[in-house]
Image (cartoon, rainbow, N blue to C red):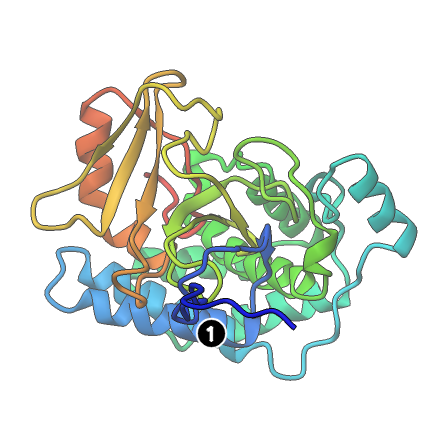
């Protein structure tokens, strides 16, 4: 028998403070859009963009409400999923998207429910054009959203299509196995290959104070090291900009690719939403653009900026 006198004891560490983050975290579409709607409406109070933020809050609420009873979306085969992992490709291939029953129903419900939204005449006219578009025209608009190549003259029309595409891809992403996802390249979602809308420094249990990029389309989050360009991967020439009195939302600029993506301190404010707070911080985009950096993020609800 042996004993130790005065041996150091293991000190307990508060739960949630040990950063052992998973590579990817999948969205929960049953709460995603409801929380986003609430954030949009909260941000609208006293904001210069208040009417638009409230409009997007209504649209996000519809994205939530229309899901009740939706058909399950078509998913890639087991063979396709295994191949994607082996070759480090996103399992949801945006370039091969075809509408299924779930997407068609999503789009139809969105059009039907959006009629009751409070919106300006121009937005209502855009809704009518989108809702009366042919099947081929809707497919073309969805393809433009997925390729991030929306024609300037039809930005408003595509907004409603983009909202339906977001719901559909979030529902598909939620059905994947997070451990099957692998890195697919800088600035690319490991789930669908989409660009980030922003990155978050989170306070999640097991991932406290670590950074996750958030997909602009399917809302999948993937772990990414700090002080590194989310687009080109360079670690030199990284800078940060913020508007006065708001350090929770900053622009991370890169002098290598001359672009920027916002980084949000969700660890300090859990209410921050990467999509809603991106729109609400448009003043930051204008500031950083004047400094000569291009916006590297994509936000389907911020079309035209």
Would residue 279 be found to the left or right of residue 128 on screen? Answer: left
Question: Which residue is located at x 80 percent, y 60 percent?
Answer: 75
Q: What x and y, as percent, mark residue 231?
A: 47, 30
Q: Nearer the viewer, residue 147 or 255?
A: 255
Above or below: residue 36 compared with residue 147: below
Would residue 216 be found to the left or right of residue 255 on screen? Answer: right
Q: Secondary structure at mark 1?
A: helix
Q: What x and y, as percent, mark residue 275?
A: 38, 55
Question: Which residue is located at x 17 percent, y 48 percent?
Answer: 247
Would residue 125 be found to the left or right of residue 292 on screen? Answer: right
Q: Residues within 10 Å of mark 1 (few under 14, many from 20)?
A: many
Q: What x and y, as percent, mark residue 100?
A: 77, 61
Question: Which residue is located at x 76 percent, y 42 percent?
Answer: 96
Would residue 179 be found to the left or right of residue 280 on screen? Answer: right
**Residue position marked by numbered label 1 in the rendering:** 62
Q: Nearer the viewer, residue 138 or 63?
A: 63
Q: What x and y, as percent, mark residue 79?
A: 92, 50
- Residue lying at the far top in this picture: please name it: 256
Q: Nearer the viewer, residue 282 or 112?
A: 282
- Residue lying at the far right in this picture: please name it: 79
- Residue lying at the far left in this picture: please name it: 244
| Residue 157 visible to the viewer | yes
């Amino acid at each position: 028998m042996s004993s130790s006198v005065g041996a150091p004891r293991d000190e307990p560490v508060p739960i949630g403070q040990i950063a052992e983050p998973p590579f990817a975290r999948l969205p929960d579409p049953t709460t995603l859009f409801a929380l986003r709607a609430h954030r949009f409406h909260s941000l609208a109070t006293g904001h210069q963009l208040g009417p638009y933020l409230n409009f997007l809050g209504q649209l996000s609420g519809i994205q939530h409400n229309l899901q009740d009873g939706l058909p399950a979306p078509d998913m890639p085969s087991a063979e396709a999923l295994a191949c994607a992992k082996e070759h480090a490709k996103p399992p949801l291939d945006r370039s091969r998207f075809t509408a299924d029953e779930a997407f068609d129903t999503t789009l139809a419900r969105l059009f039907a429910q959006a009629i009751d939204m409070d919106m300006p005449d121009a937005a209502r006219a855009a809704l009518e054009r989108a809702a009366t578009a042919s099947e081929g025209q809707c497919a073309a608009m969805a393809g433009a959203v997925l390729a991030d190549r929306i024609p300037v003259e039809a930005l408003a029309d595509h907004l409603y299509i983009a909202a339906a595409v977001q719901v559909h891809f979030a529902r598909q992403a939620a059905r994947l196995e997070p451990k099957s996802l692998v890195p697919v390249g800088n600035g690319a979602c490991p789930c669908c290959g989409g660009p980030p809308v922003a990155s978050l420094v989170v306070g999640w249990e097991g991932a406290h104070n670590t950074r996750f990029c958030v997909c602009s389309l399917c809302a999948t989050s993937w772990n990414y090291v700090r002080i590194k360009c989310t687009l080109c991967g360079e670690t030199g020439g990284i800078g940060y900009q913020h508007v006065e009195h708001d350090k929770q939302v900053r622009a991370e600029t890169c002098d290598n690719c001359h672009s920027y993506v916002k980084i949000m301190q969700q660890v300090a404010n859990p209410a921050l939403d990467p999509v809603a707070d991106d729109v609400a911080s448009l003043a930051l985009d204008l500031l950083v653009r004047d400094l000569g950096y291009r916006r590297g993020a994509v936000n389907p609800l911020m079309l035209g900026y």
